[in-house]
Amino acid sequence: MIPSIIVFFPIQEKKGEAKMLTRQLQRRFGVLPDWACAKIAEADLHALEEWSLRVLDATTLDGVFAEDE
């Protein structure tokens, strides 16, 4: 039973992070294009957390997803 719990929590954490990021982006930039939704759906937890911070300062949707230079 413990192994399924270990797997369950990271999956739920990722889903929750993706949902919150989506809501933040929609609030700031309006309806999200398909490419942004796909990027969020395919992202790992680390990327979702990084984008959730970037949304605070980004002036465009592209700015949220910009690669680090």
Image (cartoon, helix red, strand yellow):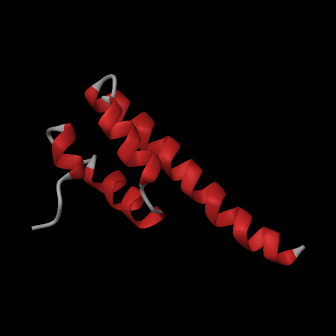
Q: Is residue 33 above or below residue 46?
A: above
Front in this rendered view, residue 6 or 58:
6
Quadrant of residue 13 within the rendered picture: bottom right
Q: Position of residue 58 (x, y in %)?
A: 18, 45
Q: Quadrant of residue 30?
A: top left
Question: 60 or 8, which lies in front?
Answer: 8
- Residue 43, image x and y in percent? 42, 56
Relative to residue 27, is residue 65 drawn left or right? left
Residue ID at (26%, 29%): 29
User: Does residue 67 appear left or right of residue 3 in this picture?
Assistant: left
Residue occupying image coordinates x 51% and y 52%: 17
Looking at this view, name the residue that lies furthest to the left: 69
Single out the residue that lies furthest toward the right: 1
- Position of the N terminus, as image quadrant, is bottom right
Question: Taking the image as drawn, is residue 14 in sight?
Answer: yes
Decide if residue 57 is in sight here: no
The furthest residue to the bottom: 2
Residue 31: percent from left, percent from top = 33, 23
In the image, is residue 42 above or below residue 26? below
Which quadrant of the figure has residue 27? Answer: top left
> How many marks do you count on the picture?
0
Residue at the far top in the pictured view:
31
The x and y percentages for residue 32 are 33, 29
Q: Indicate left or right for 16 with 42 as reference.
A: right
Quadrant where the C terminus lies? bottom left
